[in-house]
Image (tube, rainbow, N blue to C red):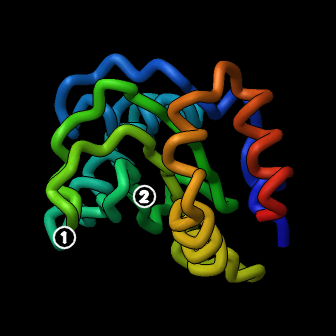
């Protein structure tokens, strides 16, 4: 399983505009191109997950994730806000890079946790947080995933 197989350039935004956690979540959800009702449902699910504990894993990275009936296959998106914002991360540092993961409640392929784990592993590589801030295009994001073989 290669992480890059789950991402597509049209679900990558390198210039998120939001200034609050909620605005960032809305922008990330928008990258999945769902209808309005499904977006609202997904937002509620992600908020519920964030209320359990922040998905800000530190080093400027957050991985908001949940299971929801609004998708029938695992969906992922990546967004970046260079200025960063308070995401209640475990290291109390602003989050700048956001990996959204949404999976159906039941999935035959059971990819949700492996994908979450691979993103966390990718994010922990020494040079990745800085390189994510430096990429200039969705194609460069995809190339970084390819280079790291995740």
Which of the image's four quarters has the C terminus?
Answer: bottom right
Q: In the displayed image of the protein, which residue is found farthest to the front? A: 126
Q: Which is more N-terminal, label 2 or label 1? A: 1
The residue under the point 78% across, 40% down is 142
Per the rendering, the mark at residue 53 is 1
Question: How far apart in space, not on screen, are marks 1 and 2 (Cα)?
Answer: 12 Å
Whether residue 24 sits left or right of residue 113 in the image: it is left
Pinpoint residue 43: horizontal percent, then vertical percent.
31, 45
Pinpoint residue 130: horizontal percent, then vertical percent.
51, 42
Q: Foreground residue, 125 or 105?
A: 125
Residue that label 2 marks = 63
Pinpoint residue 10: horizontal percent, then vertical percent.
70, 27
Identify the image quadrant of residue 97. top left
Residue 84 visible: yes
Q: Foreground residue, 12 or 47?
A: 12
Identify the image quadrant of residue 53. bottom left
Residue 48 visible: no
Whether residue 108 sits left or right of residue 55 in the image: it is right
Pinpoint residue 58: horizontal percent, then vertical percent.
32, 60
The residue under the point 76% across, 50% down is 145
Near mark 2 (Cα within 10 A), the count class, few <14, some 14-19 or many ≥20, is many
Identify the image quadrant of residue 134. top right
Is label 1 in a helix, a strand or a loop?
A: loop
């Amino acid at each position: 399983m290669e992480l890059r197989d789950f991402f597509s350039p049209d679900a990558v935004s390198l210039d998120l505009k939001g200034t609050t956690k909620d605005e960032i979540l809305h922008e990330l959800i928008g990258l999945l191109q769902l209808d309005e009702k499904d977006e609202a449902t997904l937002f509620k699910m992600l908020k519920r997950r964030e209320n359990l504990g922040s998905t800000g894993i530190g080093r400027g990275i957050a991985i908001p994730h949940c299971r929801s009936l609004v998708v029938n296959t695992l969906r992922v998106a990546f967004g970046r806000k260079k200025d960063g914002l308070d995401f209640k991360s475990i290291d109390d540092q602003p989050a700048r890079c956001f990996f959204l993961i949404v999976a159906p409640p039941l999935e035959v392929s059971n990819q949700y946790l492996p994908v979450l784990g691979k993103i966390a592993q990718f994010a922990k590589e020494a040079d990745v947080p800085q390189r994510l801030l430096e990429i200039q295009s969705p194609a460069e994001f995809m190339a970084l995933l390819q280079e790291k073989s995740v």
